[in-house]
Amino acid sequence: MATDPLEQLRIAITETDKQLLETIAARQKLTMEVAKTKVKHHIPVRDQVREEQLLIRLIKQGQSVGLDPHFVTKLFHVIIEDSVLNQQSMLAQWANPDSQLPINRVAFLGEKGSYSYLATQKYFARRSGELVEIGCDSFAQIIQSVENNTADYAVLPIENTSSGSINEVYDQLQHTRLNIIGELTHPINHALLVHKDVKAEKIKTLYAHPQVFAQCSHFLADLGNVEVKPCDSTSAAMMKVAELMQSDVAAIGSEAGGKLYNLRATQSNLANQKENHSRFIVVASRAIKVPLQVPAKTTVIMSTVQTAGALVDALMVLKQHGINMTKLESRPINGNPWEEMFYLDMEGNIEDGPMHQAIDTLRGMTRYFKVLGCYPVEEVSPTRVAATQALTQKHSD
């Protein structure tokens, strides 16, 4: 009997995929050798000029074998991002040898399938050691888990591009002795999750976390007369729908999380803002040292004296030292009516001269000042090279 020609092609594709994976793995090993060289010679992890030249060359080479420039650019953006994050992770491990644990006990909001769970999986995938997941019912419980040594780390959502800052987390940071040691940004794609196929207009009860309801308010308005029931987490909402097994109830959460509870997505991308991302921070009992080759961020909290222009004077210190502030958040101080605590995220390493000097100056001019953490920046912005630029260079060569 003749061999199926389609099956022959699939076998060939499978072998090509295997070779492709082996080639990518070999490239990763080379980038780790690059990281060692950068440590030895104090070279920054990222070289934007080198990345731009690399992309232009790859686009040309791709065109010579019939590949679309946009496809080549997208593919190597992912490869470069992975390379940068792996190098940063290696440098951080070398700078903090005592922080490497055989088991990483991590506290987060909710259970399997929550967005905090997915963020935890993503962040610790690049860290050595076995991951032990500790689901919690509240942000206070998450913080307490690390403070009483039940957990080694905590992952906390701090802000969302659609619903803004998560104030309860900022309030917890005001009183904890924990340190921020990392951050990550995770895409949030809210989906309507049901036990059985059902049209949206048939749903009578909807479960979700309050932040999710805020992010999907336009979708809720279009649904009309639906009973909204808040839950402690998106995983709790999904667990409730899975438990009820009714055709007129649904949850809003991630499609990946829903699959863990045998729920199916009937609609997706429900958030008001279609580019919806949440930023998470990772906290631990001990601060870490960030190598100067790695892009870093420093977070502080402070309260200023109650005089006109006191906050402006403090912010001018950052300008004088050339420090870019990426976040300014204010929260009321318990017991002090009309007084605010200010949270600042700044680009820079606390070990670097300008940041060190700015912090010393701020300590001396504020009523209260504390560094919450200095940590690597894990958001890798892609090097932008227009396909037309590569084409122009090709024709001019």
Image (cartoon, helix red, strand yellow):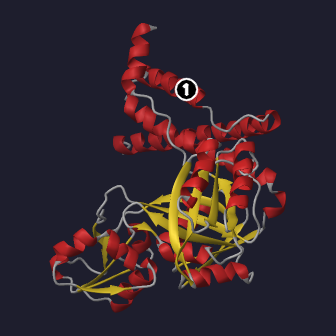
> Residue drawn 66% across and 83% down?
144
- Who is closer to the viewer here, 166 or 309? 309
Q: Give the labeled residue for mark 1.
A: 54
Rendering coords of residue 71 (x, y %): 40, 35
Query: Which structural element holds mark 1?
Result: helix
User: Which residue shows up at 72% across the image and 41% down it?
Assistant: 293
Q: Which residue reaches farthest top?
A: 397
Q: Nearer the viewer, residue 144 or 345?
A: 345
In the rendered structure, the answer to whether residue 114 lies left or right of residue 245 reads right
Residue 121 visible in rendering: no
110 left or right of 255 in image? right
Amino acid type of the residue that numbered disc 1 sits on in the rendered structure: Leu
Give how far across and how far down residue 196 sits, in percent: 27, 80
Where residue 365 sits, quadrant-wise, is bottom right
Q: What residue do we see at 17% from left, 72% from top?
A: 222
The quarter of the picture where the N terminus appears is: top left
Left/right placement of residue 292 relative to residue 64 reads right
How many marks on residues? Answer: 1
Q: Is residue 325 above or below residue 98?
A: above
